[in-house]
Image: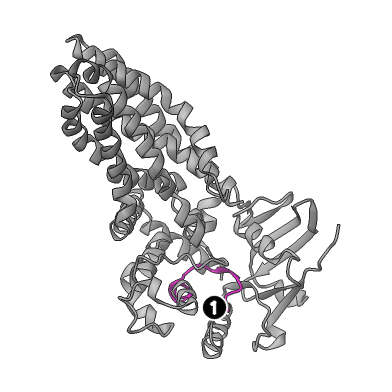
């Protein structure tokens, strides 16, 4: 009997691969998101609405608008990410699929990384495409467009990765929304500071590689460390 | 119990001195449990006695206050990957996504646990869901949700099955079929650990019973 158990063991190990597990979760999360479209559209719509309201509220003065444009775009990106974070683990927690993921023989960090990547594809990536269009409304300095795109490209994954830690910690709490913002927003501040500073520097036609390098460093450290923090947090939350 | 018989059957899972505390109440203390190949173990006890807590400890979903769960000579926290290749746990919640069809749900569940997802469609006929493959799970009943998650049992190669109230919302015929499957699984060298409030029709001699009592302190 133990022989058969050992044989099963080998058979199943062959079927496990990191890439297959990653793709499995990614495909599922994207399918689910497209069948539940308002969850995807809401944060993007929020981003568009917030940014379009500013020129209306402040007035058409190009000098003021271009001065505050980087801040507005980045704050809107932070808040719209925060709005979308709940989707990451909440429904899986409520219907028991999260439990099954924790019990799967695949390493949890691969599954978590796939979920975060799916989240970024659906919330971070659209922002990168929309932001330059909205920047026109805010009279963003024409030298800054490259910096805006680059900071968003490196920065929005950080928002998803750090956000995932917060959601994983609060997923077991009924009304975790306020706690989530308190936990997460302070950790978003470094990204906000360096991203807006990079865009401002670019507007003055100066090199902004320093700020970009710091955001890049933040990106790679969260990319490597956050999935492990998230897996531990999920274990605590489901305990 | 039938220790002489157990001697020549391999030990699949062992719980040593488990103590579980929930909300400052001791649910059970120094609990020992051995699951041999061929065992069907029914955990009994009133509501709140700690049946689900015990199963979650065995599955490694929560950590015991004291004691350990041993699989293949190792603590399960150390041998996570190999333990989960040999374990099938179904909890209270069906783990079924309303936005996906019955077949997609089952295919995902199979693939997540390293099994072949191609057999999903044929497996659904085992649980009488033929004709509902493409229906979104949100349009199906609670019993049908449970059937989608139970369908994995027919494909599973894992020897250890831990099932928390598997009969909830399942009709009489379905329960008969499941009991037959449990017997077959045990005969083939697996073990089944389950909780249920229903009387099993499996012969008494085959079922080991573990009774948890409700404790007030």
Hey, which residue is sitting farthest left in the picture? A142
Quadrant into which the N terminus of chain B falls: bottom right
Percent position of residue B15, x then y: 70, 59
Q: Is A52 in front, or is B95?
A: A52
Tell me the quadrant of the picture where the C terminus of chain B can be found: bottom right
Q: Nearer the viewer, residue B129 or A55?
A: A55
Crowding near pointer 1: few (<14 within 10 Å), some, many (20+)?
A: many
* Res. A98 visible in picture: no
The x, y position of residue B157, in whole percent, is 47, 69
Whether residue A181 is visible to the viewer of this picture, yes or no, is yes
Q: Is residue B43 left or right of residue B80?
A: right
Residue B21 % position (x, y): 76, 53
Name the secondary structure under disc 1: helix
Between A203 and B29, the one lying in front of the other is A203
- Residue at the spot 57% in from the left edge and 66% down from the top edge: B91
Asked if residue A228 is positioned above or below residue B62 in the image, the reply reads above
Chain of the residue under label 1:
B
Seen at 80% across and 56% down, the residue is: B26
Question: Which of the 4 image quadrants contains residue A164?
Answer: top left
Instruction: Tell me residue B67's x, y (percent).
Output: 74, 51
Location of residue A132 with respect to B20 vertically, above or below:
above
Asked if the stretch drawn in magenta spans residue B157, the answer is yes
Q: Which residue is mark 1?
A: B185
Q: Which residues are magenta?
A: B150-167
């Amino acid at each position: 009997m133990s022989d058969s158990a050992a044989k099963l063991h080998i058979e199943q190990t062959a079927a496990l691969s990191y890439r297959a597990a990653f793709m499995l979760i990614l495909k599922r999360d994207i399918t689910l998101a497209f069948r539940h479209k308002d969850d995807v559209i809401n944060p993007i719509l929020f981003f568009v609405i917030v940014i379009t309201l500013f020129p209306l509220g402040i007035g058409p003065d190009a000098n003021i608008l271009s001065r505050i444009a980087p801040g507005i775009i980045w704050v809107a990106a932070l808040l719209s990410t925060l709005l979308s974070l709940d989707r990451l683990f909440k429904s899986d927690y409520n219907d028991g699929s999260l439990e099954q993921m924790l019990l799967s023989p695949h390493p949890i960090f691969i599954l978590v990384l796939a979920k975060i990547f799916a989240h970024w594809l659906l919330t971070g990536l659209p922002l990168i495409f929309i932001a330059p269009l909205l920047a026109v409304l805010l009279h963003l300095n024409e030298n800054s467009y490259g910096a805006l795109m680059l900071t968003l490209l490196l920065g929005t994954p950080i928002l998803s990765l750090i956000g995932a830690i917060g959601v994983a910690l609060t997923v077991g709490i009924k009304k975790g929304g306020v706690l989530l913002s308190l936990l997460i927003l302070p950790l978003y501040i470094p990204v906000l500071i360096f991203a807006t500073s990079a865009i401002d520097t670019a507007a003055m036609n100066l090199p902004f590689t320093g700020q970009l390098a710091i955001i890049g460093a933040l990106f790679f450290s969260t990319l490597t460390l956050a999935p492990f923090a998230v897996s531990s947090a999920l274990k605590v939350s489901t305990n | 119990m039938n220790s002489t018989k157990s001697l020549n059957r391999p030990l699949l899972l062992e719980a040593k001195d488990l103590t579980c505390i929930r909300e400052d109440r001791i649910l059970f203390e120094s609990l020992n449990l051995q699951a041999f190949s061929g065992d069907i173990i029914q955990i009994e006890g009133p509501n709140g006695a700690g049946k689900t807590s015990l199963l979650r400890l065995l599955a490694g979903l929560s950590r015991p206050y004291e004691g350990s769960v041993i699989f293949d000579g190792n603590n399960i926290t150390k041998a996570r990957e190999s333990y989960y290749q040999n374990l099938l746990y179904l909890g209270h919640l069906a783990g079924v996504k309303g936005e996906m069809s019955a077949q997609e749900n089952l295919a995902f569940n199979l693939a997540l646990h390293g099994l072949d997802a191609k057999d999903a469609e044929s497996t659904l006929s085992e649980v009488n869901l033929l004709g509902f493959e493409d229906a979104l799970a949100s349009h199906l009943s609670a019993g049908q949700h449970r059937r989608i998650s139970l369908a994995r049992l027919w494909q599973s190669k894992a020897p250890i099955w831990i099932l928390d109230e598997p009969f909830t919302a399942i009709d009489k015929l379905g329960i008969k079929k499941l009991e037959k499957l449990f017997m077959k699984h045990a005969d083939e060298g697996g073990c089944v650990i389950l909780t249920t409030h229903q009387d099993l029709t499996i012969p008494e001699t085959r079922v080991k019973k573990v009774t948890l009592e409700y404790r007030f302190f």
